[in-house]
Amino acid sequence: MGRRRLLIVTGKGGVGKTSVTAAAAIAAARSGDRVLVCEMDGSGRLAASFGLGELGFDPTTVSIGAGGEVQIDAMSMDTERALREYIRLFVKIPFVDRVGSLARIFDYVADAAPGVREILAIGKVCHEVRRDNYDLVIVDAEATGHVVSQIDAPRAMSEFVHSGVIAEQTGWMSEILEDPVRTGVVVVTLAEDLPVAETSELIHTISTDTGVAVASVVVNRVPEAGLDPVAVEALRGAESAGVPGAATVVASAARADRAGRVLGDLLDEAGDGVAGAVLPEVEADDEGGIVVALSERIDALVAHLTGEDEARG
Ligand SMILES: Nc1ncnc2c1ncn2[C@@H]1O[C@H](COP(=O)(O)OP(=O)(O)O)[C@@H](O)[C@H]1O
Ligand SMILES: [Mg+2]
């Protein structure tokens, strides 16, 4: 029993991680979830997706829609702030705010011990899940190269530290991250050779090197052919006869076909119970418009991913 509380969205840079994250957040909020969305890479792109200048560590409530009917809390990760909050909550040192040199100490420690920044970032996210202020936390995670060390940080740390405060902390974090009912990775890709190769490798690495489950594979930016195969065949004839526009339609039908095959292959690699989705190339005037348009196309996937455990296939 239970439901998904944490979605970690990743993929190769530029494939649409941030857009898919923001769209999924809107879809979940529209269905009634209290949603926190967190950008990990500090690029500021998530803010742009919501039409904001910037986001900080303290969540900003974003209103979506003309009447502001959907609200989402959004934040940007800041590991030094996460450390301050952590010390205040768990170590209970009351004078943290007066430790002016914390930043320097932190840099020193973070540079010396691998995984410190990662654990603070993912730890903050897990803390938000455990704290239960939100139904769903969606993370706009690091790209392919860095995401594994981030989601695996608590488990990696626990291999070195077996008892004491740190082991306790990594314990509850891993419990959340490694529970496939509560936590899942959403891997976003384009139906192009390079992203697909990277995605396939990423799915493999996540399943062999971490205890975190892949929940979904999303093929993004697929042109909508919207034509039946017979019409496409007819247009193929028109294309060779040089009819203007036919080539474009035939090409986008071919890309849509390819996206379906790519998704099928990736889902085979990902194993049982992983939900697939193809998202269209949408058109809008700005990032905010793209994300809202996308949110209407990602509804079913989000409902599936956040539904009660028994309902998920
Ligand atoms: N389905 C889509 N349709 C149209 N444009 C998209 C779509 N998904 C992403 N984009 C655009 O592609 C660009 C990169 O997307 P972004 O979400 O920032 O990628 P990432 O976070 O993976 O680097 C953005 O300008 C975004 O608006
Ligand atoms: Mg991004």
Image: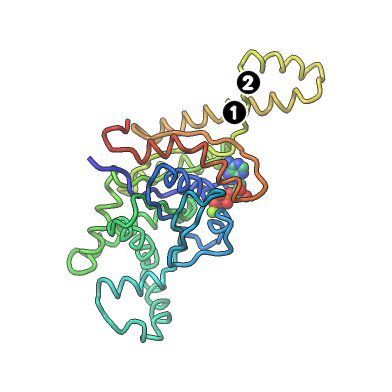
**Element type at mark 2:** loop
**Element type at mark 1:** helix
On the image, the x and y values in percent for residue 238 come to: 77, 16
Residue at horizontal 42%, vertical 81%? 104
| Residue 104 in view in this figure | yes
* Residue type (three-letter) at the residue carrying disc 2: Leu
Between disc 2 and disc 1, whose residue precedes? Answer: 2
Q: Quadrant of residue 232?
A: top right
Along the line of sight, which residue is nearer the eye, 206 or 285?
285
On the image, the x and y values in percent for residue 157 come to: 29, 62
On the image, the x and y values in percent for residue 243 come to: 81, 20
The residue to which callout 1 is attached is: 256
Query: In the image, is 298 to the left or to the right of 231?
Result: left
| Residue 13 in view in this figure | no
The residue to which callout 2 is attached is: 227
Ligand 2, seen in the image, is in the quarter at: bottom right
The label shown at residue 199 is: none
Residue at the limit of the structure toward the front, as seen here: 67
* Residue type (three-letter) at the residue carrying disc 1: Ala
